[in-house]
Image (spheres, helix red, strand yellow):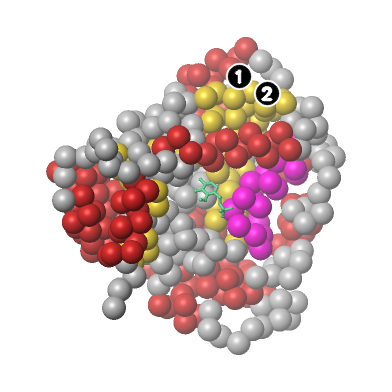
Amino acid sequence: MLKRYLLAPGPTPVPPEVLLSMAMPIIHHRSPDFLPVLDSAKKGLQWLFQTKNDVLILASTGTGGMVGAVNNFFNPGEKVLVINGGKFGERWTKICQAYGLRVEEIVVEWGYSIKPALVESALKKDSEIKAVFVQATETSTGVYHDIKGLGSVIKNYPDTLFIVDAISALVAEDIRTDEWGIDVMVGGSQKGLMLPPGLAFVSVSDKAWKKSEASKMPRFYFNFKKERENLAKNQTNFTSAVTLIIGLNEAIKILQKEGLENVFKRHARLANATREAVKALGLGIYSKESPSNSVTAIEMPEGIDGQLVYKTLREKYGITGAGGQDKAKGKIYRMAHLGYADTFDVITGIAALEMVLK
Ligand code: PLP
């Protein structure tokens, strides 16, 4: 028998209470049964996002939310600034280019975090920049970018939107949407929220709604204006992902019981324990600056293939973590401590890693 453990930075394990809640018979998304379900989900998301803004609920993966964050606010030819410090920063660039935006990139070396002063000088130099796109946690490198610092810079530019992919950071990091001036923030279900894949969440500020009025980019499925109108009636534009939204309420209930501050503290403690254990094993942390509380990217010793470590952990010990992507492939192994994670997940993950490397 091989017992399975999921320690990947998404999808992450789903608590039994959430699984059971999703075993309920399907209810109809336009019936009175569903309206209080969506009402509760939308309020719960506002609590989690620390915002008074609308948080849209989309039946898609996180990337769908990223696409919507591009094609609802701009016009082709407009210029935007993308912070590219890994695979997901690269994704912002690709989506923006697919919709005809002119992209200027600040390329951040993998394993390092953006210095807000660099963004400030880019914005000072170029008044055409209509938005700054960044990841909160760049999952491919395990780095958490300084969202608070970026927010305090971008706040001074009334024509520039601050757009954050918090897909892997949500729940693990204390991100204050309203206090830090985040205009659009994207989350996903299968990471810190302890749900199966299939939902994206997007918060939108008044400033972003205002800018969206002038946007003429083609859109049909990810039409935020229509989603907002539906949300006001506790509905979604198309058929709601009823089961996942019922699960979402249960997951939020668990997080609310723990308390947001304690949720962040737990993630910080697990991340810190993982990093200390990694160092005690004589290994390095790939994130040279600002390591995230969601996932730890662990450097492999000379001559050891990270992909083989990933494979051995999976096949011999039943542990699914993640290897490296792109230029980090083979060089790192990534272990998450995200969502439904506790001390014993860290102990299990580290003990197995030690067994594999010995
Ligand atoms: N952005 C970040 C930071 C992620 O970690 C991920 C998922 O790994 C994505 C975007 C893409 O999300 P999805 O696979 O749900 O589309």
Q: What percent of the width, then of the height, locates residue 8?
A: 40, 56
Q: What percent of the width, then of the height, locates residue 337?
A: 34, 55
Decide: is 70 above or below 35: above
Q: Is residue 66 left or right of residue 216?
A: left
Q: Residue at point 55% right, 63% down? A: 197
* Disc 1 + disc 2, Cβ < 8 Å: yes
Query: Mark 1 belongs to which amino acid?
Result: Leu
Check disc 2 and report the residue beneath it: 129
In this view, the residue in front, 249 or 140, is 140
Q: Residue at point 37% right, 64% down? A: 6
For label 2, the SS is strand
Identity of the residue furthest to the front in this view: 303
Check disc 1 and report the residue beneath it: 123
Q: Which residues are magenta?
A: 51-74
Identify the image quadrant of residue 126. top right
Decide: is 189 above or below 34: above
| Number of numbered markers | 2
In this view, the residue in front, 10 or 239, is 10
The Cα atoms of the two marked residues, 1 and 2, are separated by: 7 Å
Query: Is-magenta flag for residue 61?
Result: yes
Identity of the residue furthest to the bottom in this view: 25
Q: Is residue 71 left or right of residue 310?
A: right
Q: What percent of the width, then of the height, locates residue 111?
A: 39, 32
Q: Is residue 276 visible?
A: no
Identify the image quadrant of residue 27. bottom right
For label 1, the SS is helix
Q: Is residue 347 visible?
A: yes
